Image (spheres, rainbow, N blue to C red):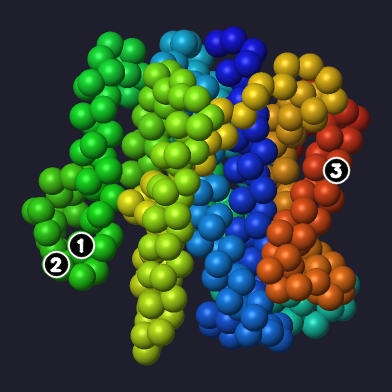
Amino acid sequence: MNTPRHTQLDVIRLFAFFTLLACHASDPFMAAATYGKSGLEVDPSLAVWAARWGSFVRVCVPLFVMLTGALLLPVKQDMGTFYTRRISRVAWPFLIWSSLYYLTPWVTGLLGFDKHVIYDLFAWAESDSQSLSDALGLIVRIPYHFSFLACHMWYIYLLIGLYLYMPIFSAWVEKATRKQKEAVLCIWFASTFLPYFHEYVAKYAFGTCEWNGFGLFYYFAGFNGYLLLGHYLHTYIRWSGVKSMSVGIPLLVIGFFVSLTGYQYILSLENCTPEQVELFWMYCTPNVVLMSLAWFLMLQCVKPVEEGTTAKVLANLTTCGFGIYMIHYFFVHLGYVTSNALMLPAALQIPVSALTILTVSWPIVAVMKRIMGKGSVCLFG
């Protein structure tokens, strides 16, 4: 893979990180506006902009999965080597940082903080327990369960699952023709309508029922489609900037409109469930696919930066990225407090909060990796 293509992907990675941090920066606002749970006083205009930003940034996870597909498919190593290199670099930081998140409430108790500080630090926390036994209980369950004290860790289970699947999927990707890949992508895109079909047409459809959750589209559904989509776009699509923009902007507008209006509609319902609240923001839905496709197309056309400070910064983000992901949620409340203290317009509070989180997290990881050298792998991947 040549350098220009790598640097183009670095630009996509930078945007994906910004949307990820903005997604989590909106949590204090969303928790208060949706459930009144965080205890924060939220201006109605902030709740409105939290919904808008929340809809806009749904592309964060799909873009990361698409980058994984673009960079790693087809897999070049044998299965054992791939598993050892990829999963071990993810598993240890995941276990260590998850444990630190789960121990934090207990530490706040030792320091004499009121229980409510837990909801300040972790907007979606299930409880305000400061008990060590509860923390240890969460740690013991890490192999199969995540707590909303570290709500972003759900992605690591997904990532490990994708890594397990990729060498197997890769054998088909390597031999399949472009038209065959397009056919699979079409079937996958059809599967993204299933959440809406189950909600508004039939709960049990295409063979699913109480004793069978594996229906007609099951084998084509899920994040594996984003893996293939990232590989496909990176391998075959080399459009001009004008063509990418002319296709990408309409797709982005349509996807964003459906995500936002759908979310607002759900919130207007009485007694909507948490599952319904997330319905139009689910990652494997057609509106989010359209936005993710649009951004990948448009950002892939950014002129490559092959050398200089910008190239070095983007390369460093690649090196530090996983570590930033691990630690950034500790600074979500700091981002909220900072943007609130600056008395910014509602539209700017969440992006400024996201930039604050990035500004704090990135240097910490970069410095620690330099100090620890190869030993930093266990902490930062």
Q: Nearer the viewer, mark 1 or mark 3?
A: 1
Q: Residue at x 62, y 29 (%)?
A: 302
The residue tagged 1 is 197
Image position of 100 (left or right of 68) = right
Image position of 20 (left or right of 279) = right
Q: Amino acid at mark 1?
A: Phe
Q: Could you tell me how far apart the alpha carbons at marks 2 and 1 are, in whole angstroms?
A: 6 Å
Image quarter of residue 2: top right
| Mark 2 or mark 1, earlier in chain | 1
Compared to residue 380, the image places residue 77 above or below, namely above
Residue 1: image x %, image y %? 55, 11
Residue 83: image x %, image y %? 49, 23
Q: Could you tell me how far apart the alpha carbons at marks 1 and 3 are, in whole angstroms?
A: 45 Å
> Tag 1, which secondary structure?
helix
Tag 2 near tag 1, CB within 8 Å: yes
Residue 16: image x %, image y %? 60, 43
Q: Is residue 207 visible?
A: yes
Q: Could you tell me how far apart the alpha carbons at marks 2 and 3 are, in whole angstroms?
A: 49 Å
The residue tagged 2 is 202
> Tag 3, which secondary structure?
helix
Q: Residue at x 38, y 77 (%)?
A: 266
Q: Nearer the viewer, residue 60 or 218?
A: 60
Q: Amino acid at mark 3?
A: Ile
Image quarter of residue 232: top left
Q: Nearer the viewer, residue 242 or 299?
A: 242
| Mark 1 or mark 3, earlier in chain | 1
